[in-house]
Amino acid sequence: MLLGPGPNYVFLTVTLKLCVVLKLINCTMVNDTNDKLLDMVTVIIPTRDEVKGIGLVLNEAISVGVPKNRIFVVDGGSKDGTVDVAMKYGVKVILQVGEGKAAAIWTALKYVDTPYMLIMDGDYSYPAKYIPTMVEEVTTTRADEVIGVRIPLPGSQGFIYRLGNKLLTWIFNLLFDTRLHDVLSGMYIVRVDSLRDAVADVGGFSIEAHIAAHMISTGRVVREIPIEYRPRIGEKKLGVRDGLRIFSDMVRLTTRYNPMLILFLIGAILLIPGLALGTYVGYWYVFYGIKYYLKGLVAIMLTLIGLQFLGMAAMAIYIKRMEYRLRKAIESLHRD
Ligand SMILES: Nc1nc2c(ncn2[C@@H]2O[C@H](COP(=O)(O)OP(=O)(O)OP(=O)(O)O)[C@@H](O)[C@H]2O)c(=O)[nH]1
Ligand SMILES: [Mg+2]
């Protein structure tokens, strides 16, 4: 016997259809929001000989919804066909001006016309699924930079590499008085306006540290979110020597962005032995009448030069504060 649709059946069908419609609306809304977020960002992928990874990276980035015309592969003279592969994907390919990964980022900055740019490696170590998450984080918190703190998946970071990263982040925190967790992460998003006034001539080996140093020392807001870090595809390029180069870069960045620390340290290094030697010379003269001319002269020189450096450190703090206030005033004028 064939049964016709009873009231329960009708109710169930209507409810089901309603659910499907609501789900579709919800999906469309989510997609719309995603599209709006992704409209604000250009994805920059610096490459040098990444023929094995670049295709996978581009596939992923396109599949999360980044339009092809807003994915820039910035190449540093690859000889393995990376550029040809990138061109097949229909993304924008730019040949960098100058050498090194840093030069690639400064070159890209000239072409970006979105409010944000997100940088990620071309070796498939950073999952593109975090692109929308990072755009959302930077826009909702109104930060100037969001760094993806790497949670290493098995096989992605050897012991020395992980230790080196931790050590360099620790040194950076010490030099810039910050509490960052992974300053050398290769996946981060920045507000383009906040980056345009950075000076491109320092920090050639560590563009990540350079950008973070610039943001922090100019009073900008840097935030972090955790991201997975996969084993890279293709040949590993960084070694212990690069770690040392990054360290010397950080010191150079400190002289540019946080000079008071260096001036203060030099001042203290000269002043402390100067005062100690002065006390020694004074003690022998006052209690025993013995005159140490040369030691006395050295003590005076060390003390005077040390005091001068401390004075310069105080001046540097004053100038930095003035720069900070002026920048804030100019930014508020731009907003009004
Ligand atoms: N445009 C450009 N890209 C570069 C240059 N050097 C490295 N890259 C790219 O920058 C990204 C990160 O560089 P890597 O050498 O992989 O550095 P890393 O990811 O910290 O270290 P490993 O993955 O361990 O080698 C990769 O996509 C590289 O291909 C360069 O001189 N110019
Ligand atoms: Mg890498």
Image (cartoon, rainbow, N blue to C red):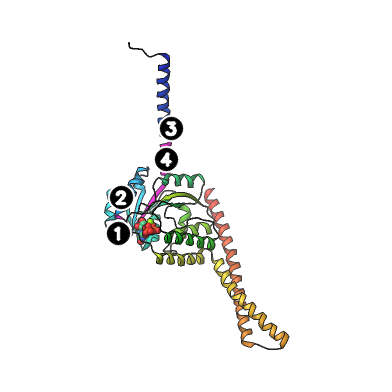
Between disc 4 and disc 2, whose residue precedes? 4
* Whole-number angstrom distance, CA of label 3 to CA of label 4: 12 Å
* Whole-number angstrom distance, CA of label 2 to CA of label 3: 32 Å
Q: Residue 142, image x and y in percent? A: 51, 47
Q: Residues within 10 Å of mark 4 (few under 14, many from 20)?
A: some
Is 21 magenta? The answer is no
| Residue at left offset 49%, top offset 66% | 251
Residue 231 vertical placement versus 320 (above, below): above
State left or right for residue 204 relative to residue 84.
right
Between disc 1 and disc 2, whose residue precedes? 2
Q: Decide: marks 4, 2 in contact (CB < 8 A)?
A: no
Residue kind at label 1, given as amino acid type = Ser
Q: Which mark is residue 55?
A: 2
Between disc 3 and disc 4, whose residue precedes? 3
Q: Which mark is residue 78?
A: 1
Residue kind at label 2, given as amino acid type = Gly
- Between 228 and 46, the one lying in front of the other is 228
Residue 304 vertical placement versus 94 (above, below): below
| Residue at left offset 40%, top offset 45% | 129
